[in-house]
Image (tube, helix red, strand yellow):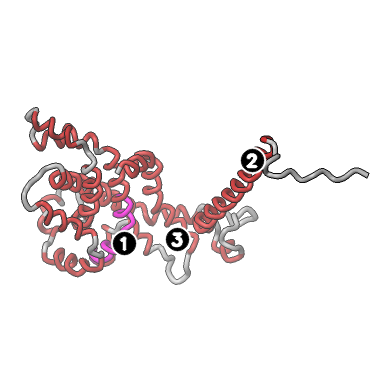
Amino acid sequence: MSSPPATPTPENRTRREEIADAVRDAGRRRIALYVVLFGLVGFYLAPLEAGLMTAFKTTDAFNRTVPFVPPIFGGFTLEPWRVAFNEMSHALINSMLLAVPATILSAGLGSIAAYGLTTIDWKYQMPIVALFVAGIFIPYQAVLVPLSRLFAIVNTQELLSFLWGLPLMHEHYASIINLIITHVAYGIPITFLLFRGYYQNLSVEMIEAAKLDGASVFSIYRNIVLPLSTSMFAVTLIYQFTQIWNDLLFALVILPSGGGAAAPVTVALNSLTGGIIQSFNTQMAGAFVAALPTLLVYVLFGEQFAEGVAGS
């Protein structure tokens, strides 16, 4: 009778057995990693999937089924999307008129301020830097009353009355200008801080060499600093555009009588309730319509955004 084969000790294991064990352990770890990743993706995307499915269902199908089940057994409709587009088309234009100039202005002014307070040495600059940084920590709620009083005293519509007779100019643009001023003022501190961190890593020798060649402060910014700031501009522009586009609080406080003709898309979405009976499918379609521009911005400039974040 033959004896069973002896179990190999760690000392006498072959190289092939060690490699097989390593591959087996790596396979288990990879499977566990994929399970965790798929779980996180499902957890994150489940509300979006449920909202998207709701936007394609009739009210009856929404009441009969659970939200995340697609309407493949009846109840499919595009009517909520048509209603959402019709109700929010004017507000989408208003939000674009608001977000684009406010984003560009806050990013441009933040870049110039950071350049002047980072690469140029002058007296008392640190207290001013502290004021910029302090501006980041002022909550929205703290400035609502002063802002409403400011725009009640300063009548922008009357001050710019000479513009309303021009083609394509309307009086409700005065309220949008008020929102632009607010978002630019509130956005400069954060864009300043982002650009300041980026400019602190610029080559001092390069700036000094330009000064020795006789370049002025403005010339150095225009010909050297600004071209090197492309990736950071992508970061600030995407960040500011998203913040301004999704803002609701300033719009509710600053715009008179619920926004009216100047209502941005967030106010229009808030009004898309469907009256006494809640139209959840229309509200979900409106939410996706409102989010579409910010999604497109991230898709088009996501690579530059990642480069700017990595290089900051």
Mark 2 / mark 1, whichever is N-terminal: 2
Query: How far apart are labels 3 and 2 at the CA level?
Result: 50 Å
Neighbor class of circle 3 (other Cα within 10 Å; few <14, some 14-19, many 20+) is: many
Residue occupying the point 59% across, 61% down: 61
Task: Give the image location of residue 97, x and y in percent.
Answer: 26, 49
Task: Give the image location of residue 175, x and y in percent.
Answer: 21, 58
Three-letter amino acid code of the residue under disc 2: Val
Residue 248's disc number: 1
Residue occupying the point 26% across, 62% down: 250
In terms of depth relative to the viewer, which is nearer, 30 or 2?
2
Three-letter amino acid code of the residue under disc 1: Leu
Mark 3 / mark 2, whichever is N-terminal: 2
Three-letter amino acid code of the residue under disc 3: Gln
Task: Give the image location of residue 205, x and y in percent.
Answer: 17, 33
Q: Is residue 167 visible?
A: no
Relative vertical location of residue 173 with respect to residue 17 in this rendering, above or below: below
Residue occupying the point 34% across, 59% down: 266
For the magenta stretch, what is the residue range? 241-256
Residue 283's disc number: 3
Q: Quadrant of residue 17?
A: top right
